[in-house]
Image: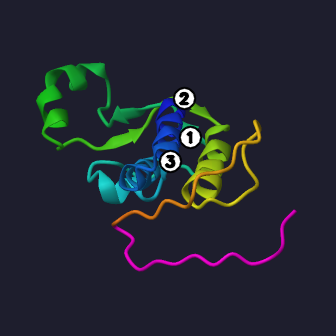
Amino acid sequence: MHAHLRQAEVLARLGAADALWHAIGLASPIRVTEILETAGLRQRNTYFSSSDAAFPDRYAASGDWAALREGRVALDGGWRTYSSGPGIFTRLVLQLALGLGRGDASGRVLPAPSAASSLPGRRMARRGGGG
């Protein structure tokens, strides 16, 4: 997941809005179930390090690998979770996708908000001062 989120950061900096929002959707434990039909719902306060095929054991996986490739086997969260992913994800959405914040740690200005073509007519209003 870390590599996926870092790739999304690069997409934001390149201005690849559609690819960025697709990557955000794949990282979202809810949205991923709408993008990938075989993805199962996942815990939201931590992130899984991988997606594992929902086979009961390695023998079943070995015997029916074709079912996975054909999309007939669900994708569940892997066996290992970590908790830094949600923070990276939140920063990605707020700062890099929506352009909210003062800049990154190096003082660089944040990119402009990235509106995906799948979000036509959406507007964002920002209130409050800053400084």
The amino acid marked with disc number 3 is Ala
Q: Residue 60 at what x, y percent from top left? A: 22, 25
Q: CA distance from mark 3 to mark 2?
A: 28 Å
Which of label 1 and label 3 is nearer to you? 3
What secondary structure is found at the residue carrying circle 2?
A: loop
Residue that appears at 67% across and 37% down? 84
The crowd level at tag 3 (other Cα within 10 Å; few <14, some 14-19, many 20+) is: many
- Residue 10 falls within the magenta-colored stretch: no
Residue marked by disc 2: 80
Residue that appears at 31% across and 55% down? 35
Residue that appears at 42% across and 47% down? 23
Q: Is residue 7 left or right of residue 34?
A: right
Residue marked by disc 1: 47
Q: Which residues are magenta?
A: 118-131
Q: Residue 87 at what x, y percent from top left? A: 68, 45
Residue marked by disc 3: 12
Q: Is residue 95 left or right of residue 10?
A: right
The answer to which of marks 1 and 3 sits earlier in the sequence is 3
The crowd level at tag 2 (other Cα within 10 Å; few <14, some 14-19, many 20+) is: few
Q: Nearer the viewer, residue 117 or 61?
A: 117
Which image quadrant for residue 51? top left
Q: Quadrant of the C terminus?
A: bottom right
Determine whether 110 is above or below 67 in the image.
below
Determine whether 79 is above or below 124 in the image.
above
